[in-house]
Image (cartoon, grey):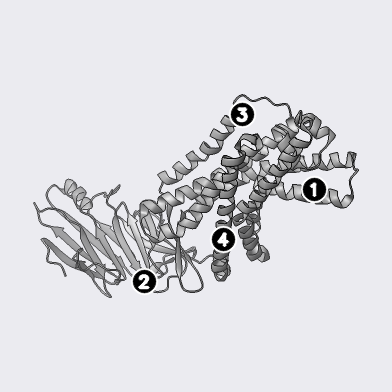
Amino acid sequence: MKKTNKSSAAIVMGDVNGILQMQAEDTETEDACYATDQNTINILDCQSDLNMDFPWSVTISSEAFDKSLLEFKGSAFVGILRFKNMENMNETKNYTVLNNEVYGIMMGANISDLTDNIEMFFTQKDLVGEASCSSWDGKGNLTWTTSGCETEKIDNNTIKCSCSHLTFFAVLMSPPDVNANITAPYIESLSFISSIGCGISMFFLSVALFMHFLLRKAKSNQATKILINMFVALFILNLSFLSNESVANTEVKAACVFIALLMHYSMLTTFTWFFIQALHMYLWLIRQNVTITNYMRKITVFGWTFPAPMVIAVVSIGGYKAKIISATSEKSSQMCWITDPIIHYIVNIGYYILVFIFTTGIFITIFTRVVQARRIRATDGKRKTFRKQLMMVLSLFLLFGLTWAVAFFNYGPMLIPSYYIFTVLNSFQGFFLFLYYYHIHKDLEGNFSDDPERSASTTTIVQSRVNSVENVYNESN
C-alpha cells in the first residue's frame, strides 16, 4: 500500500464497492494507481506495486487531477466504483462483459480530451472472442461506445484500455469469428507459403529492376515503364510484409505505425498500377491514336500520389495498430495493420472493387477483340491458337491484378481452398510477373530486329497480325 497525502474512504453497497479519495489542498498532483482484489479497491504505488496480476488496475494521470483542480479550485477528488454481476445487462446477447464487471471513474468534473490517457488493465485467463474497450456516459439507455478508447491485447490473458476521458468502462467481448476458428489450424502453413513466395518474388523483382535500369532502360517503351513501376510497388509491398511481424514484436508504437502505413500504401499503390495497366491497354489497343501530353509523367505522378490521401486519413485517426494473430501451436504472433474492420472494408476492399470492375471490363473487351481477330484470319493450328490465348489470359490476369479477386470466394466450402489459392497466386505474383517481363523483352528484341516496319503503327498491328496481346501491347508504342 502507498502512503499518500490523500484521505480515502471505502465504499460498499451490495454488488457495488469502491473507493473515494480526496487530495489535500496545495499539494502537487501526481499519477494515481488503483487495483481490485476480491472485495475491495486498493491504492497502489505506481512505481513499485503496479502489475498485471490484478483482475483490474488503473493509472490515472496527473493531467486528470490538474483538470479537476481547475474545477474545484484548490482540491480534487476521485471516486472509483466497481459494479459486479453485470452479466444480465446485455439484452441483444451479441457481446459479454469481461469478468461481468463495470468500472466507473469520476472526479466531479467533465474530464475529457486527455493527452496523457488513463490506462486500465483487465485480466482473465484464456480470453475468448474479440475484445473492445468501451465506455458509457451514464445517461439514458445503456449504450456503449469505443470512442475515446484504444484497445490492445497484451497476451491471451490481458486487455489494455487507454482512454482519454473518465466515465463508466468495461471490456466487451464479441463472440469469436467462426471463420477464424476454422482457419486457425492453417495459419502457420499459410504464413510459411507467404514468406517463401514473397522472398522469391522479391528476388526476381530485384533481378527485373536490375535488368531494366542497368541493361535495358534505353529499349523500354511506355508499357515497360508502367510494368517497372508496378514492380517497385510490389517490391515495397513484399518487403514491408516480410518485415511486419519483426517490427510488431519490438512493441515500438511509432515503428508499428510506420510499417503498417508503408505496407498499406504499397498495397493501394499496387492496386493503382493495376488500374493504370488496364487504362494504358484501353487507350492504345481499343481507342488507338490517342495523343496525351506528358503521358508517362502524368500517370507516374497519379500512380504514386493517388493512394496517399487514403493512407494519411487512416493514420490521422489512429487506424494502424498491432494486432494479435494466434496459431494452433499456442504461440501468438503480432502484425501491424488496420484493426478497425469498417476502415478495412471501405478503404481496401472498396477501392479494390472499383479497380476490379474497371480492369475486368477492359480484360473482357481485349480478350473479345483478340479472339475475333484470330477467327477472321484463322490460319494457325487450333492447339497453337488455344495455347497463345491461354497465355494471354494468364498474362492479363497478372497485369490487371485479377488474382486478388480470389479473396471474394472465402465463404462456405471454398473458405480454405480460396485462402491457399489467394496466398500462392499473390505471394508469388512478383515471380510470375518477372517471367512475363522476360518473355515480352525477348519478343520485343526479336520483333524489332527481324521486321522494323511492324512497329510503325498500332492500327496496322491490330488489324494485320494479332499473334498475342503481349506482342501488340509492346509494339503499340
Disc nearer the start of the sequence (3/1): 3
Q: Nearer the viewer, residue 414 or 214?
A: 214
- Real-space Cα separation, disc 4 to disc 1, in angstroms: 29 Å
- Real-space Cα separation, disc 4 to disc 2, in angstroms: 45 Å
Q: Secondary structure at mark 3?
A: helix
Image marks 4 and 3: residues in contact by CB distance under 8 Å: no
Q: Nearer the viewer, residue 191 or 73?
A: 191
In screen coordinates, is 48 left or right of 25?
A: right
As shown in the figure, which amino acid type bears the numbered disc 2?
Asn
Q: Nearer the viewer, residue 37 or 240?
A: 240
Crowding near the residue tagged with mark 4, few <14, some 14–19, many ≥20 C-alpha atoms within 10 Å: many
Task: Give the residue pinned by disc 4.
Answer: 194
Across and down, in percent, residue 40 comes to 24, 72
Task: Give the residue pinned by disc 1.
Answer: 389
As shown in the figure, which amino acid type bears the numbered disc 4?
Ser
Task: Give the residue pinned by disc 2.
Answer: 85
As shown in the figure, which amino acid type bears the numbered disc 3?
Tyr
Across and down, in percent, residue 136 comes to 36, 56
